Amino acid sequence: MSAEPDGPEDRLLRLTTIWSRAVYPVTSTSLTRAEFAERLLPLARRLSELLRARSFDADAAKAVGAALVGAHCTDPEALSRTLDCVDAYLVLYCGEDGPQDELRLRSSRLQHAMAAGYAQALRERTRAEQEAIAQAALRAQGVVAQALHASEARFRAVFEGAAIGIGIADLRGNVLQVNEALLRMFGLSEPTLRGRRVQDWAHPEDAPQIRRLYEELVRGEREHYHVEKAFNRPDGTVLWTNLTVSLLRDADGSPQYQLALMEDTTERRLLNLRLRYEATHDALTGLPNRTLFFERLEKALNAGEGQRFGLCYLDLDGFKTINDSLGHAAGDRLLVEVADRLQSCATAPGEMVARLGGDEFVALTTGPGTERGVDELAERIMNALVTPISIDGRDLLVRGSLGIVEGPAGERTAAEVLRSADITMYRAKSAGGNRAELADPEADARAITRHGLTTALPTALERGEFFIEYQPLVHLGDGSVRGAEALVRWLHPQHGVLGPDRFIPLAEHTGLIVPLGRWVLEESIRQARAWRERHGGQADPLRINVNLSPCQLGHPGLVQDTVDILERAGVTPDALCLEVTESALIGADDDLLKPLRRLAEMGVDIALDDFGTGYSNLANLRRLPVSILKLDRSFTQGMQRFPADPVDLKIVEGIVSLAHSLDLAVTVEGVETGAQAEQLRILGCDTAQGWYYARPGPPERLHDLTLVDSTG
């Protein structure tokens, strides 16, 4: 087709026209094709709605399939042509601009449900026909036993004209009479078929109870039974039937004949098998897909005592780069080749390979000895990827990250096993890729906790789960409280109070650090105003220190946000000190330093936090807009011993001297003893913080410390 239809209704009419043209020749309807198309239109509209519905409605799709039977589309070819049309044109004309892969998956599920609904409706219709024939046969049973029965003509008409196969045999199993439909089903002549015995028609796939049901019927212990049964045809093919066998009694009620009614279900069974295969196998590689893999995994996990399983979860390293550079067609050929190699790795009983999607594959091994078997399977997989794959004249080197999970059956669900394998695979990828890692329950637990925290972060700020504690900054000269550092905490509903080391890296990774940092700044400035109003008479008003992450430092709204917050709170810039880690400023260019310079020019103090833990490029201090150096606690640990480490003393003394020569104040972290505080005072440090003075706490505690300070 060279042009697309104009609107949704036009596309729907086009789909209906194609559908009616395909199916009309194999229907038994008395309608014209145009009238038949009008009858199909509401069914097409329903399929379009189901394709784009938020949730999948299998019952509605089954109803569409059943409606085909009601429209006299009872030839199996009608269903086959319908499914071909839906497969080819439903997404094309009714999918609009939706995600094509999801729509095609939804279309496949709709086809499967339609086929099920069609089969059920056809079965019910056939059963009704069978019941009518059985009733007619029962009413005519005297004709079989006595040639003088008055309704022989009616029975003969039903018997010969029925669309299903009918056969009559005596109680010893000798076939007495068959109709034309039954002869066509078996491909035999009447003399040949009538010469056979019922007992000769056993098939290897017969259900175990079929023999028992038959024997009960010929003994007169049951009136009928219904089973699904296979028969071997003379040409070697298999005939599948819905078989109903009824007992015919004579006028005195004694068992006399058996009546068999057969519906040929071979085409329907093949269709269901085809749909089942398509629903459980990957269209690109032919490997089992996620659905079939989970079925096998759940079966393995429920295998019983003494059984184990091993799972290898593979993700190709750098596949996205190959896909983007060479195109999706080349990427698909690469996946097919990888799938073939993986398939050759899992050929032993109890082993399978599946594609979960994209470039993710899984290999499963089951049985009592998977501890060693899964290691061998993983080794075969990694070796299979060593040889380059030739695509479009290029030899591509493919590597993969492999997560291995092994254990006894019955202890975990399939979802838990796959999650553990996924976490382990990403651990292998984080370690550089091209390697296999064995699952570690403790590492799994940490990863799951991190994932849970990451997921809960966005709503935690909305729910008000964050709060701030303050640790005082004390002047070493006179012991007065000069301010406090704001330290954010998360009161998690399940994990309790979490320190910033547990969630700040996650917030930086997700981008939530910017709104979280803005909230911390707003709350801290509001608290600074409250302190200044409360202690307005102090010569040195209290100052609040707030940490800036590297992500915040690079955010374009940093300066304007800070100005707006200060102005709304009515607080002057000198009440704020922003702490930036030394590592964040290593190699910083002028663009990154520009916001800090603007803030410093406004009067905001900038502190270089954790000084001494990075490269400590002292020459770099001249170009940084900082006014305070915060020495890392590692420098004070050596001062907890007596006598203090002379090397640490010399280093601190040198840093303090350098800082003061550059007009920089020095703050020391981690002060835990009075001896440390005194030594740092002697060395010339300006302010300090640590547990010796106070642990981080609510703002009221700082007020109490300040009150004590002001009253001596």
Image (cartoon, rainbow, N blue to C red):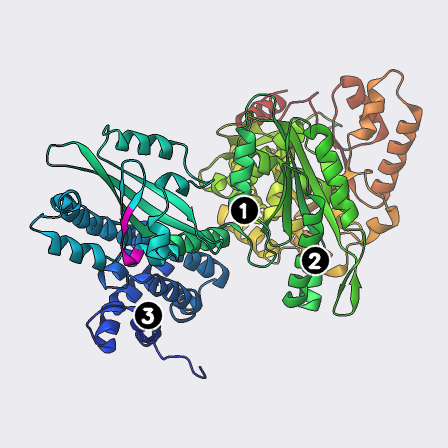
| Cα separation between marks 2 and 3 | 39 Å
Q: What quarter of the picture does the C terminus occupy? A: top right
The earlier-in-sequence mark between 1 and 2 is 1
* Residue 497 visible to the viewer: yes
Instruction: Kindly indicate the quadrant of the structure image that contains residue 674.
Output: top right
Q: Are marks 1 and 2 in contact (CB under 8 Å)?
A: no
Percent coordinates x, y for residue 568 in the rendering: 49, 49
| Cα separation between marks 3 and 1 | 34 Å
Which mark's residue is nearer the viewer, 3 or 1? Answer: 3
Element at label 3: helix
Q: How many C-alpha atoms fall within 10 Å of the one at disc 2: few (<14), some, or many (≥20)? A: some
The earlier-in-sequence mark between 2 and 3 is 3
- Which residue, given by chain and number where applicable, does mark 3 sit on? 23
The earlier-in-sequence mark between 3 and 1 is 3
- Which residue, given by chain and number where applicable, does mark 2 sit on? 337
Percent coordinates x, y for residue 665 in the rendering: 77, 39
Q: Identify the residue shown where x is 27% and y is 32%.
A: 218
Quick check: 610 above or below 288? above
Q: Identify the residue shown where x is 38% and y is 38%.
A: 199
Q: How many C-alpha atoms fall within 10 Å of the one at disc 1: few (<14), some, or many (≥20)? A: some
**179 within the magenta span:** yes
Amino acid type, mark 2: Glu
**451 within the magenta span:** no
- Which residue, given by chain and number where applicable, does mark 1 sit on? 290
Name of the residue lying farthest toward the top: 642
Residue nearest the observer in this picture, 680 or 351: 351
Quick check: 526 above or below 589? above
